[in-house]
Image (cartoon, rainbow, N blue to C red):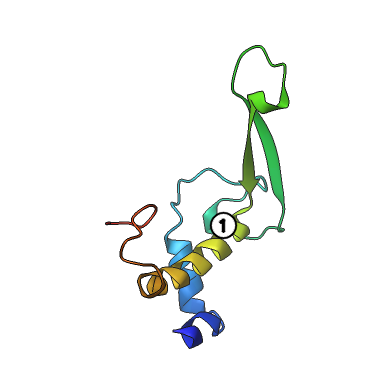
Amino acid sequence: MKHFLVKPYNRDEVEIALKQMPPSKAPGIDGMPAESVRSLNKTLIALIPKVEKLEFVTQYRPISLCNEIYIIISKTIANKIKCVLSMVISESQSAFVPKR
């Protein structure tokens, strides 16, 4: 199991992550859609108001606007981890575990 997680990513794994990206998905902060990934690793934090009359910072909801390259790398890592989660997560764990 450990060997699987520490081995270098290969082209197939990256291509699988790319194929999991919906082609019609809105582009990230870089303006580049998933089909033409060539961006820098930057993330923009935007504050979305929760209420009309803003008085406190807590009345904003922060969201991260990530570039496509970041999302692709994250999905590639997540896909690798998904394969071994059942071996390290207890059967009694049900929150955030699909099909439990």
The image shows residue 71, relative to residue 2, as above or below, that is: above
Could you tell whether 69 is left or right of 93 in the image?
A: right
User: Which residue lies at the image location 43% right of the left edge and 52% below the top edge?
Assistant: 22
Relative to the observer, which residue lies in front, 1 or 26?
1
Q: Where 68 sits versus 10, above or below?
A: above
Name the residue furthest left. Answer: 99
Q: Residue furthest top?
A: 53
Residue at image position (72%, 16%) is 55
- Left or right, 71 with respect to 79, comes to right
Quadrant where the C terminus is found in the figure = bottom left
Q: Residue furthest front?
A: 92
Q: Quadrant of the N terminus?
A: bottom left
Q: Residue at x 72, y 53 (%)?
A: 42
Left of 78 or right of it: where is 97?
A: left
The residue at which mark 1 appears reads as 71
Residue 82 placed where, x, y %?
Answer: 41, 68
Residue 7 versus residue 100: which sits nearer the camera?
Answer: 100
